[in-house]
Image (cartoon, grey):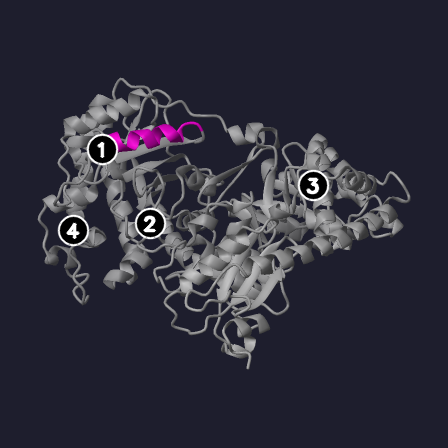
Amino acid sequence: MISIPEDRILILDGAMGTMIQRYGLTEEDYRGGTFSGCSKELKGNNECLNLTRPDVIKAIHEEYIAAGADIIETNTFSANQISQSEYGCEGFAIQMAYEGARIARKAADEAEAIAAKVGLTRKVWVAGSMGPTSKSLSLSPDVADPAFRAYSFDQMKEAYGRQAEALIKGGADVLLLETCFDALNVKAALSAIQELGDIPVMISVSVGDRSGRTLTGQTLEAFYTSVCHFPIISFGLNCSLGAAELTPLMEDLGPWCRCAISCYPNAGLPNEMGGYDQSPEEMAAQVRAMAEKGLVNIVGGCCGTTPDHIKSIAKALRDISPRKLQADVRNTEKILKVSGLETVNIDVKRNNFTNIGERTNVAGSRKFARLISEGKYDEALQIAARQIEDGASIIDINMDDAMLDSTREMERFVRYISNDPAVAKAAMMIDSSHWETILAGLKNAQGKCIVNSISLKEGEDAFVEKAKAIDSFGAAMVIMAFDEEGQATTYQRKIEICERAYRLLTEKAGVSPENIIFDVNILSIGTGIDEHARYAVDFIEAVRWIKANLPGALTSGGVSNLSFSFRGNNKVREAMHSAFLYHAIKAGMDMAIVNPSMLQVYDDIEPELLKCVEDVIFDTDPQATERLIEKAAEIAEEEKERKMRLERDIIMALRQVYDPEIPVNVYDLGLIYEVKVDDDHNVYIQMTLTAPNCPMADYVMEQVKTAVEDVPGVVSVKVDLVFEPVWDKSRMSEEALVELGLDD
């Protein structure tokens, strides 16, 4: 087991590829007798040399050890079936990995033995190098199909697993996942390694540029949040940039990275020919400046570095103390972090409240369900984007519908999200009652997700098994207050189930408390049924109990359930949601699934309506529901009148927009086929033109959109252009016909 010393910085070796180039090896060196039947050129496939020129590889290891390296990397960066398939050598991948580890192991053991002969104690660790492969699980290689992936999570996991097993058998002390650019690839590797046993792992990320984001768009903190469920011994950066350029990014790691931090930069930035010119002395000076800031525990070199660079770095760091290892802040302060491309901190004490968008749920949005069933994923993504624009930092994704293949649709939509940065920045809540659908979501999300949900409905054994599986992906999990006897509806049942689940999760499943989120069932109130009267207040009191008695656990719920009996009356529903959340948050509620556009500011709720709503929420008056129903009827009538006035105002606005070629407004000309105003005052307009090839089409549509947007009360406008049915003069108004002299 590799250990991170507190008194010195560990030295990692330098570039293997740079050193191999110095040997001037030929195609025959790579091919040897082993690959004589291979039809593809193998020069550059350095892992072949583990089988054909082990002497060269061992000599390079020995040079780095002599230069002062404490850790040497195996020549196995691409020794996996996926990478080797590009050379037609996938059948040799496991052998390459095994021999690569064995060669490094022999070099390390011999160095230790030589030191022992002269009375010295020296330890040289072997790090099994595992590169990222050339494939991404998060991004599509086909611009025409965002959901396409060259390999699945399970295929990537299998390839990594076989490589890892061979490296360990060959003698590696630690596995080094390096030059990582996709957290989902890393999660596949970690999943495979976890099944092999207690194996130490180092992770090193390669960023796309100085912004500190990976090629998939993740921030470094979001990447770390995605993978830190695994007990990694170090996290850091390699490749991409030189030491000077990486230093600002290394400074960013310190506040949130709880393990040792590594850095092995390139020898400066590449020259015009793609080579590296930075001298050992210059690189060592830049690395020393980084180390003097207390940023690193492990330092080495990547592209362009040689034993001379490593020797200079080792000398420069001899008197520098390493970074002090940080305590596990999350486990101490009970803060849940989830991630998409960016990190979301769920901490009610610091961030107040976390909003989870609900409209990407086929059961909760008819429009979203229709778009998914029609395969219009780009339009479905717009719904997710709107939720984020309105304040959601997590989006709930649910594909459970009898007419859909929920597993397939979950996979496709999550993959689409990964290709849309505006949506992918948010964290995802994978929501399904089907276990395979949950797994499909987890296997396609690069960030740290929340699973919604599991329960004790199927008994303790199934509950613990599913919790362990979710935890292996690093995901947090929503626990429903539901057991073998059914759904909890009373305060006592809610807290009994939650206490039992908490004990099972923390004691048997090994789940950290901050990854436990209890949903104690927000149920409909204002139904007129006596048994429903305390549903809201019992939820609030159960939340208060959980926060006081189950340390670290969080609480959530689906808020729209509360107001189902008032469907169609958005003003009342918004008031109910806002008032309920106001009191639930005060009790300790951390997050909620809610449509952010259907929330009012609590202090802005009409006093009479607020009184009616809160009387129902807290069950303070037997007549509360009846009074709220009466108030809702008044509001509905007022809203009907407002909507009619708004529609009239919209038509008046459309009559101010004229066709550029005909002196008649677009409405009387019959170009407006349909005007729809929804309950939220979003306007949808379907229009046509007199001719399909009209050069002024964009101009006219923009004029229509602008005119309607300017109408007071309109929230948004969407204009669609259609040419079916075909326009003709029969669609013109009498006024237009008279104006154009066509009324005869």
Residue designated by label 4: 53
Q: Are marks 4 and 1 in contact (CB under 8 Å)?
A: no
Q: Amino acid at mark 2?
A: Pro
Compute the Cα span from label 3 to label 4. 70 Å
N-term mark: 4 or 2? 4
Q: Quadrant of residue 645?
A: bottom right
Residue designated by label 2: 132
Compute the Cα span from label 1 to label 2. 30 Å
Residue designated by label 3: 578
Residue 383 visible somewhere in the drawing: no
Crowding at dot 1, Cα within 10 Å, few <14 / some 14-19 / many 20+, comes out as some
Q: Amino acid at mark 3?
A: Ser
Q: Quadrant of residue 152?
A: bottom left
Q: Is residue 200 left or right of residue 491?
A: left
Compute the Cα span from label 1 to label 3. 69 Å
Q: Position of residue 221 (x, y in %)?
A: 43, 37
Q: Is residue 558 left or right of residue 704?
A: right
